[in-house]
Image (cartoon, rainbow, N blue to C red):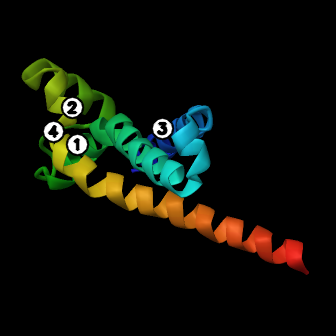
Amino acid sequence: AQMLSVFYGLGQFAAYDQLNRAGRHIKLLNDHSDTRHFLCGGIAGAIGNTVSTPFDVIRTRIIAQDHGRGYTSMREGMRLIFVNEGFRGLFRGLGPSVLQVAPLTAIQFWSYNVVIEAALDYTKTE
């Protein structure tokens, strides 16, 4: 679960930072920062989710397996899934997961930036 969180966070925030910087060079997105934050947040959530999905697949299978049977470690789980199901096996459920996470992350990044901008405007008027 910790690897899942680490890879999701790293993937999401690194992608958001790069996308947001690139979006500032696109006139339409630079002029509409709310739209930029929303779009970049959604894409970043999808990227973070994609990067972390193999860890989620393995974690879920380890939790669901019978005691004393199945994978003995995350490494073994990755290897056996790759051998038996191929690369795609590590990404089972990615589509529905991205459909859930991308809009949520888009709203989170957008609302965070709305609050930050409002707080900055408020402190400037005082």
Q: Is residue 76 left or right of residue 41?
A: left
Q: SS class of the residue under badge 1?
A: helix
Which amino acid lies under the numbered mark 3 shown in the image of this protein? Gly
Write down the quadrant of residue 23 in the picture. top right
| Residue positioned 15% across, 54% down in the render | 64
Residue 25 coordinates in the image, percent (x, y)? 61, 32
Which amino acid lies under the numbered mark 2 shown in the image of this protein? Leu
One can see residue 40 in this view? yes
From mark 3 to mark 4, how far is it between C-alphas? 18 Å
Q: Say the numbered circle drawn on residue 90.
A: 2
The reply to whether dot 1 and dot 2 touch (C-beta < 8 Å) is: yes
From mark 1 to mark 3, how far is it between C-alphas? 17 Å
From mark 4 to mark 1, how far is it between C-alphas? 7 Å
Q: Is residue 61 left or right of residue 15?
A: left
Q: Is disc 4 surrounded by few (<14), some (14 to 19) or many (20+) residues within 10 Å?
A: some
Mark 1 or mark 2, which has the lower sequence index? 1
Mark 4 or mark 1, which has the lower sequence index? 1
The reply to whether dot 3 and dot 4 touch (C-beta < 8 Å) is: no
| Residue positioned 57% across, 37% down in the render | 27
Report which residue position mark 1 lands on. Answer: 57
Mark 3 or mark 4, which has the lower sequence index? 3
Q: Nearer the viewer, residue 122 or 85?
A: 122
Q: Say the numbered circle drawn on residue 11.
A: 3
Which amino acid lies under the numbered mark 1 shown in the image of this protein? Val
Q: Nearer the viewer, residue 15 or 8?
A: 15
| Residue positioned 62% across, 38% down in the render | 24
Q: Nearer the viewer, mark 4 or mark 1?
A: 4
From mark 2 to mark 3, how far is it between C-alphas? 17 Å
